[in-house]
Image (cartoon, rainbow, N blue to C red):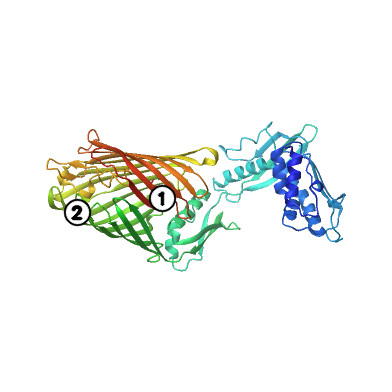
Amino acid sequence: MSVRSFLFACAWAVCPSTLSAADLSLSLGGDEDLAETLTNASLLVQVQGDGASTRRDLVAAAQADYRRLLAVLWDAGYFGPTVSITVDGVEAAALPTVGGTGPVSGVAINVTPGPIFLFGQAKIGPIPPGTELPEGFAPGERAGTSILRETASAGVEAWRGRGHAKAELASQDIQADHRATQLNADLTLAPGPKLSYGAVTVEGNEDVDTDHLLRIVDLRQGRVFDPEEVRASARRLQRTGAFRSVSIVEGEEILAGDQLPMKVQVVERLPRRFGAGAEVGTTEGLSLSAFWLHRNLTGHADSLRVEGAVEGIGGDSGDEDLSIGFAYNRPATFNPETDLFVTGQIERLDQETFSSNSAELVVGARRIVSDEFQYSYALAYERSRVTDAFGTRTFNIFSIPLEAQYDRRNDPLNPTDGYYVEAGLEPFHGFTTAGSGLRFTADLRGYQHFGAEDQTVLAARLQLGSVVGPNLSDVPADDLFFSGGGGTVRGQPFQDLGVTLPSGRVVGARSFVGLSTEVRQQITDTIGLVGFVDAGRISEGSDWSDGQSHVGAGLGVRYNTGIGPIRVDVGLPVSGPGSNTGLELYIGIGQAF
């Protein structure tokens, strides 16, 4: 189909019945991409598509189209075009907008783009040393208003990044040489003075303390203006969860001493929130959880989250497990980027291989380095009473948990690209029956999309864990490692793989390595299919050198919702000790990893 025929067909589809397909035409020299862009930019086409066909509407739209179509052509590098828009054979620019009310029998849009212009001269200045300009702003490159805007913006932002907050484009000398089909551009910037922050005021906060809000923002008066620092301040406020919207506005006027006043505008969220979740596994049974969240608990943008869970309802791995805990977070406690957190939990576990009652308290600091990277350090104390193959013991353990996270996923709920890394290192000292040593864990996940419209995603996950130092009998059972179930190897029963003692009893291992792979294929906007293979290996030692392995595989369905995909997976054991032959079913919200 030719460009002209394509556009005639478009016109027929969008125009009211008072105009025929031949009455609306575009002559664009065979450039289909440009034709589509011009068609989308035309207000006349849009007005007709909306069903408006009065003469006044059509003439007004036609007159507006001159500027709209020229903007598209100049943006693409066509600086010598001819644009003609006629209504009943008369050029629309010559018609009065308010005038006749008779019907319109014909409208024609004719565009001759002319030649593409290249840059003859491409200058911008002054700019700071080391400024990176767009590659297309150079002699011999294709000209266009978009590259001019990008170049001016790059120059202005370079000055702003060096403290010149009021930098602007002062003038531009742009000349089109039609004989040489060249565009000569000379952009002049006005950096303005180097500024520092002036007084910072706050608007919109009702319950959050102003002084602590300013501590989170941390735009100290007298410090040199930095736009990235301003953006980081806004992100810190948003991360607290206390505000529905945040904006930091620069003052219009420069004050004495080259100081720039700043204004923080916020809208607070409702203070309380409730939530619940559920997950089902064939051997794990039904798991239910609920939480209550209080934002801005003490007026310092701090939060308290209380959460409870019941797991293993109707499962085959022992009686129900119960837990209740809290997590308190106070932003900007030690410095603007470092929060205070306090967590506590009481838990009762009744597994097939052990049972335990425990209580834990953790106090620490979390440093948020960037949107992707954060780390934390803490002091923790845990007391537990455990009954397993070694008998009944009481453990008192003091530890120093160290954790780090690096998250480059494009969507935490349903990632299709990027990677995620989480690692933990926990030196611990045990009293009475508990041993002392080091516990290490790591979780690495990667995602890559392929195919038309990125409908196919390959996902992989590597899990590592090791306890170094004490014997198996000197470590609480829930700090050891098992393999099998929805979180490790789907298709194998929950915690099916452990260390078998000479007595025949099974306990957890001192080391674990797990590998999970998935192929995710999107079928429709809401339905996706998944194929997966999981493998796990546990070892009585701490170096993963020996031990037992098992593998599971299966298929799954995903139904995308606004809060993440609903997940249904069916797995089968592939290999491993024992004679497991049954299906394992897993239902939950969110991807498996």
Give residue 275's quadrant in the image.
bottom left
Q: Secondary structure at mark 2?
A: strand
Nearer the camera: disc 2 or disc 1: 1
- Foreground of the two, 420 or 495: 495
Give the residue number, with chain letter if any, for mark 1.
Answer: 567
Q: Residue at x 35, y 61 (%)?
A: 290
On the image, the x and y values in percent for residue 152 come to 64, 43
On the image, the x and y values in percent for residue 319 come to 23, 56
Residue 373 visible in the picture: yes
> How much space separates mark 2 and mark 1, taking CA atoms?
30 Å
Residue contact between numbered discs 2 and 1, judged by CB atoms under 8 Å: no
On the image, the x and y values in percent for residue 350 come to 22, 55
- Seen from this angle, which residue lies furthest bottom? 206
Give residue 406's quadrant in the image.
top left
Please tell me how crowded label 1 is: few (under 14), some (14-19), or many (20+) other residues with Cα within 10 Å: many
Q: Could you tell whether 463 is left or right of 471 in the image?
A: right
Give the residue number, with chain letter if any, for mark 2.
Answer: 355
- Foreground of the two, 219 or 526: 526
Amino acid beneath label 1: Arg
570 in relation to 245, above or below: above
On the image, the x and y values in percent for residue 85 come to 82, 48
